[in-house]
Amino acid sequence: MTAEHYFSAEPTAPAQRGEIEFSAAGRDYRLTVASGVFSAGRLDPGTAVLLRKGDLPTATTTGVFLDLGCGYGPIAAVLATESPRATVWAVDVNSRARELTAENAESLGLGNLEVAEPDEVPGDVVFDQIWSNPPTHVGKAELRALMERWLPRLAVDGVAWLVINRHLGGDSLHAWLVELGWEVERVASQKGFRVLKVTRKTG
């Protein structure tokens, strides 16, 4: 059996479907998952740390959010549920991931969640919040290209929340973002993961 990366655009292996359950912000979630998608067997530990340590929006929060590399949609589902007045874009190169995210959004009744492949997001969309457990296994160059593509679309007063495995370049990514001129704060370090808060420098 050939190994297939979760960041393949079109997974070819048959989708072995299942469900996972997790809690975030005091709510319980049950999402459909499938093989060929990132962390299909459980909520990824990095995602769990991000949802626990990041400053999640609330029911009064408005704006446009991005879940970059959404997988089957756990982060997008939480953002859209917590902030029904916001619009959440869930973006992934993996077609199976997008299908699952759309399916999960429908089952949760989330009409404020837009699922798209990267090139489908209109170029004039600016994000008030970006949330991401980015695919570190694609390599440093690809990861940095991902950041260089999407972080500039952050609103002037926007914030990006990233979770990175410390052993897979979390600290080097932090330093690199600072070199690019971003304000970066490490807000948490838990279970080998760094949670980074990225904003534009003021002044």
Image (cartoon, grey):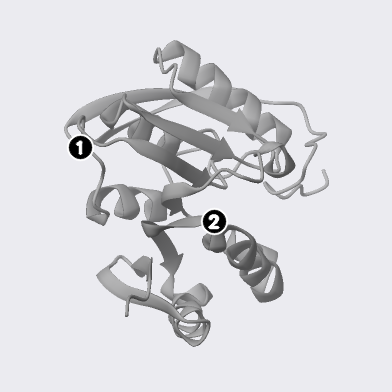
The answer to whether residue 189 is left or right of residue 5 is left
The residue under the point 54% across, 41% down is: 70
The residue under the point 60% across, 40% down is: 91
User: Residue most toward the front?
Assistant: 203
Q: Examine the rendering and report whether any part of residue 47 can be seen.
A: yes
- Looking at the picture, how far across and down is residue 164, in whole percent? 45, 66
Is the residue marked by circle 1 packed among few (<14), some (14-19), or many (20+) residues within 10 Å? few
> Between residues 20 and 107, which one lies in front from this camera angle?
107
Look at the image and tell me in which quarter the N terminus lies: top right
Question: For the residues marked 2 and 1, what is the alpha-carbon distance in whole angstroms?
Answer: 27 Å
The residue under the point 38% across, 52% down is: 45
- Looking at the picture, how far across and down is residue 50, in whole percent? 33, 54
Is the residue marked by circle 2 packed among few (<14), some (14-19), or many (20+) residues within 10 Å? some
What amino acid is labelled 2 in the image? Answer: Arg
Q: Which residue lies under the disc numbered 2?
A: 153
User: Residue most toward the left?
Assistant: 26
- Looking at the picture, how far across and down is residue 66, in whole percent? 48, 44
What amino acid is labelled 1 in the image? Answer: Ala
> Please, what secondary structure does the residue beneath circle 2 have?
helix
Look at the image and tell me in which quarter the C terminus lies: bottom left
> Between residues 74 and 110, which one lies in front from this camera angle?
110
Q: Which residue lies under the disc numbered 1?
A: 25
Q: Are marks 2 and 1 in contact (CB under 8 Å)?
A: no
Give the answer, above or below, for where 7 lies relative to 102.
below
Instruction: Name which quarter of the figure residue 83 lies in.
Output: top left
Give the answer, above or below, for where 90 lies relative to 47.
above
Q: Along the polypeptide, which appears first: circle 2 or circle 1? A: 1
> Between residues 120 and 10, which one lies in front from this camera angle?
120
> Please, what secondary structure does the residue beneath circle 1 have?
loop
The residue under the point 44% across, 16% down is: 111
Give the answer, above or below, for where 179 lies relative to 58.
below
